[in-house]
Amino acid sequence: MSRRTKRWCLTIPMVALLAAQAPAQTPSLADRYAEPARRIIDAALGDSAAWGKVAELSDRFGHRFSGSESLERAIDWALARMSAEGLENVRGEPVMVPRWVRGEESAALVTPRAMPLPMLGLGGSVATPPEGITAPVLVVGSFDDLRSRGGEAHGRIVVYNVAFTSYGATVQYRTNGAVEAAKLGAVAALVRSVTPNSQRTPHTGALRYDSTVAAIPSAAITVEDALLLQRMQDRGEPIVVRLRMGARTLPDAQSRNVVAELRGRERPNEIVVMGGHIDSWDVGSGAMDDGGGVVVAWEAVRLLKQLGLRPRRTIRVVGWTNEENGLRGGTAYRDAHAAELDEHILAIESDGGVFAPRGFGFSGSDSARALLRDVVRLLSPLRADTLFSGGGGADIGPIMQRGVPGLGHVVDGSRYFWYHHTPADTPDKLDPREVGMNVAAMAIMAFVVADMPERLPR
């Protein structure tokens, strides 16, 4: 045997020994949870139960506006249904909510021709006098435009004709339009509905008042009518509109956050909380905003229980109340659970509609982000395996401010603002299979984070 051959023969046992002593590579979260993820997806897409629950919630109770009897009956139904399904620690946690009542309302073009203007008063608006307000109109395209024409605003109804760019940018005119118009002496404000697509449908939403200026009535009109008034003004035609609004703000009312759990098998005091808001505006039936968000979180927990997938930590589903015109549910949850927020591992909110899922947006530490990037790989069969930068939601915002990492459920939002805050927010806008896909995405994300051996780092 040559010297080189002898060295080679001696090396083979040494390599084998070193290989035997090397630690086995730890499987990734995606590898470790591939089988339960497959089971969850198959079960979630096996029927249209989730869509059926959204439809029942919407059809049976209609709108679920804060302070309304229909909201409280819907909450009673949800709590009873959760208990019947065997979820644990089912309860309604008390919340005092604002109560604004729309009343009778209308708008009409008086000059240059008589014509009704479909409208919706903005949530929280004051009323007009009983006889209404009949006044000339000033159409503006921005706050800067309004200020540059400030001398023309006194005694007029200001109409904001602002095209939709993004919700965050355009909604400022709905939120702050009345205040800015009142500063210049306007008697009322009308805002072009905040939507990229319209079939002469107005979109409501909340406004804000400032105690340093007069509170003037404010409402949304349709995109088409805002453009009509713009064209009339551009031609130099005098425009007069009559606005009548019977809105009232009543004393706060008692409501509840809807809460149920799948208790953890090893660390039940550590919590992954997820949900949406149970309330809606007083138009439509709140199927998309946000009955669907509540139901996909609820169905995710029910499905995990059905499949026998009990995680190490507790998964808590919440239907927050009063997101639309007060955020009282989110702040009440923060206050009621202040002592356990250090044990909240992750908060997940679904409030963007339940169209085709795309992934999740995350706000938290880099080390947590690295783990979640591995988890979202499990969502590739749903085409929802993107982890976006930045995420959360209005209802989980209060606990995120206390340090709880947050995930926002991201879906195809191309049609969301077509129906947002309108009478057209009804179950037929949702596809049953897409609703099931969202159940699967929520269930997988919540289960893996609640079950993985290591706690999601902050």
Image (cartoon, grey):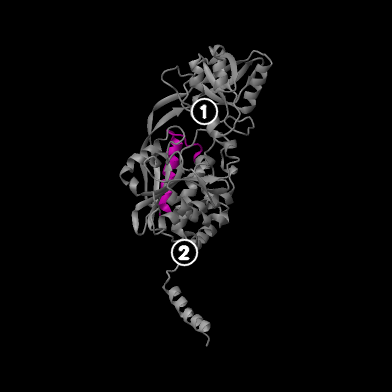
Does 236 sit left or right of 47 as displayed? right
Whether residue 421 appears in this view of the structure is: no
Mark 1 sits on what residue?
Answer: 172
- Across and down, in percent, residue 424 comes to 58, 36
- Judged from the image, the secondary structure of the residue bearing numbered disc 2 is loop
Q: Residue at x 47, y 76 (%)?
A: 15
Name which of mark 1 and mark 2 comes first in the sequence: 2
- Between 58 and 382, the one lying in front of the other is 382
Could you tell me the amino acid type at mark 2?
A: Pro
Q: Nearer the viewer, residue 44 or 183?
A: 183
Expressed as whole percent of the image width and height from the top left, the position of residue 171 reads 53, 30
The residue at the far front in this view is: 3
Check if residue 83 falls in the magenta segment: yes
Where does residue 410 sit, x and y in percent of width and height? 53, 45
The relative height of residue 456 versus residue 235 in the rendered view (above or below) is below
**Residue highlighted by disc 2:** 27
Q: Residue at x 38, y 37 (%)?
A: 331
Q: Is residue 402 above or below residue 82?
A: above
Q: Residues within 10 Å of mark 2 (few under 14, many from 20)?
A: few
Which numbered dot is residue 98? none
Q: What stretch of residues is rendered in magenta?
A: 61-86
